[in-house]
Image (tube, grey):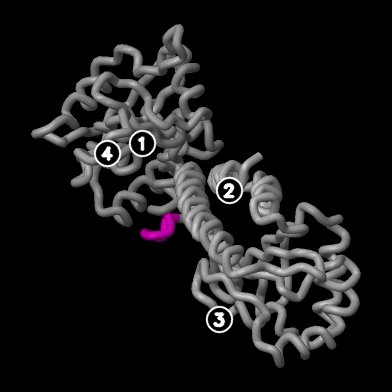
Amino acid sequence: MTEFATFTRAVSAIYDAAVEPDLWDQALVSIAEAMSASQSALMVLNGGRLVAGIMPLMDPEDLQTYAEIQQHTAKQSSIETPATAALGKVVGIDDPRARENFTKSTEFKEWWTEHDLGIGALFANVSFGGSRLAQIGLYRPQESGFTSDDRTKFAQLCEHVVRASQIQQRFRLGSAKANMSRDFGHAGFITVDEDYTLLGEDGEVAEMLHRIGLVSTSASGVRKISRNDPLCRLIDETRPPKYSGGSCCISTESGESLWVDVIPVRPGDNRKRDLLNFEKPIALLQLSIPNKRIDLRLKGLAVEFGLTPAEEAVAMEIIKGDGRAATARRLSISESTVRSHLTVIFEKLGIHRQSELVRLLAG
């Protein structure tokens, strides 16, 4: 394989790992191959100490031994020097005094030498957060080293690793927001285009929509919103110049229901230059489960207005709409107690009728 081919394969592997973190081992191997290195590593440091890491061309237990050696020895210059470098900047143990001190260290004698790692190793910071620093390392045997051209080439790869790290962080934040939204009664998010086609879909959410009959799948695998007049009308209203959207509650034959908030997606300023993106979303659909949504909203009101557990229970039951007698039976209390609790609930929330309570909780 040519030098160019190994380099481009390494770049591809780096961005594959940005999307799927389990592929960082493979990316590090590709980087080592592209650089004709004997070892490569991705290390997480805290205060200059190794707290986590991947070194795919080495036994994982050996990396653990390295961490243990670090814990029991004085902090060494091997990782102190790159700790102050900017992201993506390639550095080594270049200072003669630093080299001399490091070769006398326990870390070098008991670990680097044993694994035939040359002191000419290269490092680059690729990400940081709080007191933690992520660093990539590249090694050749002790009798070998890296040239200035090698440093330039490694720096080019490190720029891609830094970008991949930033992409990975964005994915992680997006995933965290989606998970948090589910905790607050939301089932997920879906974007659609003007033809009601699902874009960049969350497979789990899409399957749920398919199960309740809201989404159909063509023979080619394209998923679209099935003809649902209220929802399709709201999606149509997100088109220019309205950009309005709205909300609706969808009930299915199976008895399931879903609350859908339709939010317009306005085109960005760089749309004309986005030549390779054929997916043009016009609406974001935020999906939530009404019962869970009501329960969470009631808990929030209970905290804000000081509802007692008994009052909270009455409020949850009374909005089912079958009257105070049915609420009393389900809660095993008297109808007069239900009436008393409702009076206090209305006073605390500043409302006067049961219909107002329903609107307050159901949104």
Label located before the other in sequence (1 or 3): 3
Say which mark, if any, is on residue 7: 2
Q: Is residue 217 above or below residue 363?
A: above
- The kind of secondary structure element at disc 3 is helix
- The kind of secondary structure element at disc 2 is helix
Residue at point 56%, 36% (across, down): 332
Q: Which numbered disc, 1 or 3, marks the residue closer to the eye?
A: 3
Question: How many numbered badges does the structure rendering display?
Answer: 4
How far apart are the alpha carbons under marks 3 and 2?
Answer: 27 Å
| Quadrant in which the N terminus is drawn | top right
Q: Which numbered disc, 1 or 2, marks the residue closer to the eye?
A: 2
Residue labelled with disc 3:
84
Q: Is residue 199 above or below residue 151?
A: above
| Quadrant in which the C terminus is drawn | top left
Q: Which numbered disc, 4 or 1, marks the residue closer to the eye?
A: 4
Viewer-nearest residue: 95 or 123: 95
Residue labelled with disc 4:
274
